[in-house]
Amino acid sequence: MDPETLMPQAPRLLATILPSANTVVERTTQALLRGLPGVVPIFTRVAKRGAVDPFPDSYDWEALLGAADLLADAKPEVLIWSASKGAVIGLEHDRELVRRVREATGLPCETSGLALLRALAALKARRVALIGPHTRDYNLRAAWGLAAEGVEMVAEASLGLTDNLSFASIGYESVSGLLRQVARPGVEAIIMWNTNCAAAPLAAAMEAETGIPVLDATALGVWGGLGLAGIAPRPGPEWGRLFTIEGQG
């Protein structure tokens, strides 16, 4: 077999920063990019352990910018911050991250939160449901941050977990249950607002069942990152409506 087919020798790189206890972002990203052999994800982590965030109202800027600097050594096309925290503390922090990363590294930067806003605008969806393995309070705090961006949470469902590592243990049956809990008239999009809990593989099937777009926080970062990098090929419709939206980035 042709070696280029086995392993492209000059792939385009998507670089992602994720929380340290997260075991879903890498799996989801790799699965999404499986059909794009010329695009390769690379990753690094910043500390996020247990249930207590030592930076509850902001980001650990030193850690995030240090991670960005390390990834920049590999000359990726774009850097992605794959995390849901931005909506909880206010998405002005994500805009500040984008600015700081570009100043420090020259790289374009995407975040799950900013990609969410663009996807909702493309879908003309402003009334949303938030779901996740975390607590109801986390959804309410995220709703506050999204409200400042003109997005209204009209339904939510959560499992009450607090330890970051435990989020990844939630299976597809439980996630499907959360999706069905909030699928009701008036909901214009359902958002899995946690990058350590996988909803992306369920999106297409649940959209067919409910008629409502399903947006996964990790998939949003990948969608936005591909757009910022100007990479036209994208994951197929088996990953849901998100990857059929034009105007990425």
Image (spheres, grey):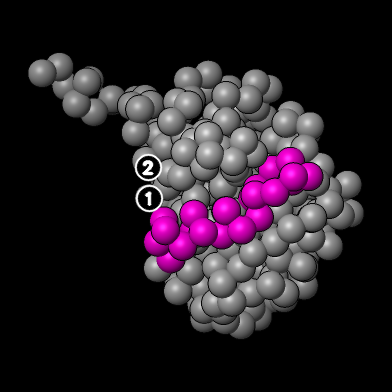
Quarter containing the N terminus: top left
- The x and y percentages for residue 145 are 81, 59
The residue under label 1 is 27
Q: Is residue 166 above or below residue 68?
A: below
**Residue 215 or residue 20, whichever sits in front:** 215
* Residue contact between numbered discs 1 and 2, judged by CB atoms under 8 Å: yes
Q: Residues within 10 Å of mark 2 (few under 14, many from 20)?
A: some
Residue 1 to residue 198: above or below: above
Residue ID at (66%, 55%): 182
Q: Which residue is mark 2?
A: 30
Q: Please, what is the three-letter code of the amino acid marked with disc 2?
A: Gln
Per the model, the C-alpha gap separating discs 1 and 2 is 5 Å
- Write the residue at 57% across / 24% down: 244
Q: Secondary structure at mark 1?
A: helix
Q: Which residues fall within the magenta stretch?
A: 170-191
Circle 1 residues within 10 Å: few <14, some 14–19, many ≥20: few
